[in-house]
Structure formats: C-alpha cells, structure tokens
C-alpha cells in the first residue's frame, strides 16, 4: 500500500502555527479560572470586603463560563470559529482592563464575569483543529492544546505569587498581566488562525441556551457558595432543587426544538456522556491538588507539627510549579500515546497515575521531595486526561457538533473544579488543631489533608472505571435528525 504524500512544508508550518496559537489561547482559558485563587485574601483586605463578598470574585467567573461556553461553542460551529474566537478574546480583554483599573468590588466582579467568557475559547479551539489539521496529526495537536489547560492553571498560580510578593503587594498587577496575555493571544489568533471554511448556519437555540444556563447557574451557585451559606441552608437546598427542575425543563426543551443547541442523542452517547463524567472527576482532582498542596505548604510546622511554613510565593514556585512543568512536558507526548494505544487507554493510564500520585500524597506528605514528586505525578495524570477526553469526544460526534460537545465537557471540568474547591475548603475548615497559641488563626488538622488527597485518589479511581468499563471500543457516532444544510459541504471540504 502506498504511503500518503507528506504535505508541503508551507502547509506544515501553517498547521504548526495554528496549533501554537490555539495552545496559547487554551492557556488563557485555564489562567482565568485560577488567577485569583492565591490573592483572594489580598483583594479582601485591599477592598475592605468580607470573605463571603470576595468569594464572588471566583464564583462570578464560574457562572459566566457556565452560561457562555455552550452557547458560544455552538455559535462558533454555526457562524464561524475565528470571528467567535476574536469576539470572546475582545470581551475578555475588556473584562481584564476593567478588573485592573477598578477599586470597587462590584466592578471587579463585573470584570470577572467578562473574563469568564474565555472558557468558550477551548471548545472553539478544538473545532478549529478538527477543521484545519489532518487526521494523522489531529491527536497530537489536540493533546498539546488540551495539555496547556493544566499548564495554564499552574502557571497562573505561580505568576500571581511572583506579582504579589512583598509588603506593598497590589492585586491590580495580576489583571494587567491577564490583559497583556489576552492582547497577545488576540493578535496571534487574528494573524495565524485561518477563517472558517465551513459554517453550518441555522438558528441559535436561545431557549435551549437559557434553560441550560439557568440549570448550570443553579447547580454551580450552591456548590461554590455552600460553605458560606451553609450546606443545609434554604438557599443551598433551594438552588439544588431548582437545578434538578431546570435540568428537566432543559431536556424537555431540547427534545422539542427543531434545531437544538444540544442534540440529546449526542449528549447521551456513551463516549460523550462518560467523557463528561471523567471530566468532572479530573477537574475535582486538579483543584484538590492545587488547593491541598498550596495550603499544606503554608502551614507552619513549628506550630502545627506538620507543613512547611512557606509563603504564598514559595508555595507556588517550589511546590506547584514542578507539577505545572510536568503537565506541559507530558502534553507533548499525549498525542503519541493516543495514536498508539487510543484515547480510552490513555485516559485509563491517566487515572492509574493519578491514583498513584494522590495515594503518595495521602501517605507521605511530610517531606518536600515527596510532595513535589507526588505533585508531578498528579500533573502528568491531569495532562493525559485532558488530552484523552477531547479525542474521545471528537471521535464520537459529527463535525458540526464538535464545539458544543467540547463546550459541555469544559463545563463538566468546571463543575468538578468547583466541587473540588468547595469540598477541600470545607474539609480543611471542618476540623482544626486545638489549643493553638493566641493570635494564631485556625489551622486544619493534618488528617484533613490526608482525607482530601484520599478523596482525590478515589475520584481518579472513578475515572479508571469509566475508561475501562463505561467506554467501549468502536461505538459509532449517534445519528442525528438535525443535520444542518451546510453539512454535506463540510464533508466535501474535509474529504
């Protein structure tokens, strides 16, 4: 059998430029989610806000992402990925500038809402890759772009620590960094990403977007605010009940709309459904590592009997940066693994490494080398998991649903991250060391860190079960009754 002809060098360079541009864009996505985590205390003291009020700086971005990601992912499939990417980046720049210039908590939250739109960049980037990169290079390209998500999350924590070190720390510098990176990314996308060759067209399912958005807001709001409201309070339980109700309304709406935003057959198709469940557990594990290791590193050993007494900067650079670098390095090889053993087994391998990493953290977190080594294992697991899930989804859905399918997967990871953040924070606060010296703030009992890391290991055990039992080989994409008129042209272009 004759070997396929290699593309001309100019075409290869153009494809590489697209991958690098979209990798930078994906890095921005994850940075927006974790950028403020180390500086919430600084923002609180600078603006004179309460802990409940300042928590909205993270919650606002999460809720914004829940509303805009599926809508913009579908919009990009219908009306063009590049202009949608440019529009999202422009909105994010406006939000970053607003956050960098304001001294008002209200306007800072508004800026964070605008930054939350950045989450839609990732599914749009994967849609561009599916259209522009040939099949033989697509797994590697998707793995690299997906791997930058894990790198961006850790990079944001490290750079935030560097920018806010010293006595006169100013949180505004962090948002100016976000602005600069967003501007560079916008210029890169404008110059290097080609215009969409295929557009499915069709009407935007506003009712589906509204009901899905309300469902996600009602789900994420109590998850992120439950530790402030109380897990058994009326607002928390009422929001969860509302989420269940809106899930039913959304499903009913999408089954009756002629051109639904989310085709329910696609949503319930086994590779998509189980990849989304895996995304939830991987997102949980990522934040369990970030928060658990960061807090553990900062606990003063001379008072608590454990921990490392590190500053925020040292905790970020010494204890979190190695796992971030590991995730970036491994992302270079994710595509090779996917080509050799397939995305399902790559996800299983990710789960095994994650179980090892968190078991290591739970059993041996008393020395710096041990915490760093275990963190690097977890970073490797997260990077491989992020590489495998889009490949599973792309293989399981038709091209015109790539954006919305990966948008839902992004939301599943965000839900997992929110659960991880809320649960780890609540666990660490639920049992503290008794008889601390006067003036020392409450410190978590060491057993709470062990429990947190053990739960994250259990989360990766679920990922292993989903990959080996839930996902099966050779499952064709679901037939859809809502193929847009432009799809035959798209197929011709791909051919």
Image (spheres, rainbow, N blue to C red):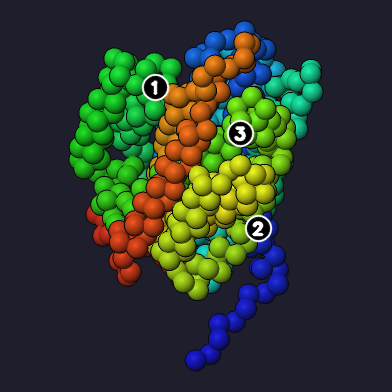
- Relative image position of residue 320 (x, y in whole percent): 65, 42
- Mark on residue 329? 2
Horizontal side of residue 101 vs 443, given as left or right: right
Q: Nearer the viewer, residue 371 or 248?
A: 371
Q: Would you place residue 203 above or below residue 479 in this image? A: above
- Relative image position of residue 232 (x, y in whole percent): 30, 19
Horizontal side of residue 411 vs 121, given as left or right: left
Badge 2 density bin: few <14, some 14–19, many ≥20, Cα 10 Å: some
Residue beneath the point at 67% across and 34% down: 308
Residue beneath the point at 65% across and 58% down: 329
Judging by the rendered image, the residue that carries numbered circle 1 is 226
Which sits earlier in the primary sequence, circle 1 or circle 2? 1
Q: Would you place residue 335 above or below residue 194 in this image? A: below
- The kind of secondary structure element at disc 2 is helix
Judging by the rendered image, the residue that carries numbered circle 3 is 306
Residue beneath the point at 50% across and 36% down: 449
Name the image quarter holding residue 109: top right
């Amino acid at each position: 059998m004759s070997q396929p002809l290699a593309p001309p060098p100019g075409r290869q360079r153009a494809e590489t430029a697209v991958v690098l541009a979209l990798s930078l864009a994906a890095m921005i996505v994850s940075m927006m989610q974790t950028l403020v985590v180390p500086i919430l205390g600084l923002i609180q003291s600078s603006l004179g806000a309460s802990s409940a009020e300042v928590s909205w700086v993270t919650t606002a971005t999460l809720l914004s992402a829940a509303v805009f990601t599926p809508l913009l992912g579908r919009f990009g499939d219908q009306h063009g990925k590049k202009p949608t990417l440019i529009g999202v980046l422009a909105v994010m720049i406006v939000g970053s500038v607003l956050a960098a210039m304001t001294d008002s908590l209200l306007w800072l939250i508004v800026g964070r809402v605008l930054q939350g739109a950045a989450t839609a960049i990732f599914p749009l980037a994967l849609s561009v890759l599916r259209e522009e990169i040939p099949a033989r290079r697509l797994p590697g390209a998707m793995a690299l772009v997906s791997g930058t998500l894990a790198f961006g999350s850790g990079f944001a924590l490290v750079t935030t620590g560097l920018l806010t070190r010293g006595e006169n720390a100013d949180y505004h510098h962090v948002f100016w960094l976000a602005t600069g990176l967003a501007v560079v990314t916008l210029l890169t996308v404008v110059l290097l990403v080609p215009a969409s060759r295929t557009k499915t067209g069709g009407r935007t399912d506003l009712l589906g977007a509204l009901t899905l958005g309300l469902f996600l807001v009602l789900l994420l709001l109590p998850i992120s605010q439950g530790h402030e409201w109380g897990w058994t309070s009326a607002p928390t339980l009422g929001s969860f009940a509302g989420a269940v109700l809106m899930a039913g309304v959304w499903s009913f709406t999408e089954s009756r709309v002629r051109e639904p935003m989310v085709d329910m057959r696609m949503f319930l198709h086994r590779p998509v459904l189980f990849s989304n469940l895996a995304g939830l557990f991987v997102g949980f594990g990522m934040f369990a590592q970030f928060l658990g290791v960061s807090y553990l590193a900062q606990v003063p050993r001379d008072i608590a009997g454990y921990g490392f007494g590190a500053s925020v900067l040292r905790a970020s650079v010494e204890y979190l940066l190695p796992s971030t670098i590991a995730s970036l390095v491994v992302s270079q090889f994710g595509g090779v693994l996917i080509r050799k053993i397939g995305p399902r087994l790559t996800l299983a391998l990710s789960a095994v490494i994650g179980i090892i990493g968190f078991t290591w953290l739970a059993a041996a977190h008393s020395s710096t080398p041990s915490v760093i080594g275990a963190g690097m294992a977890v970073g490797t697991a997260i990077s491989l998991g992020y590489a495998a899930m889009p490949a599973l989804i792309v293989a399981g859905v038709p091209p015109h649903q790539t954006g919305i399918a990966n948008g839902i997967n992004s939301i599943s990871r965000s839900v997992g991250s929110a659960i991880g953040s809320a649960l780890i924070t609540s666990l660490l606060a639920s049992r503290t060391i008794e008889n601390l010296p006067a003036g020392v703030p409450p410190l978590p009992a060491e057993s709470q860190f062990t429990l947190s890391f053990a739960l994250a290991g259990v989360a990766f055990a679920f990922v292993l079960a989903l990959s080996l039992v839930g996902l099966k080989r050779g499952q064709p994409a679901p037939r859809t009754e809502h193929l847009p008129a432009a799809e035959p042209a798209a197929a011709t272009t791909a051919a």
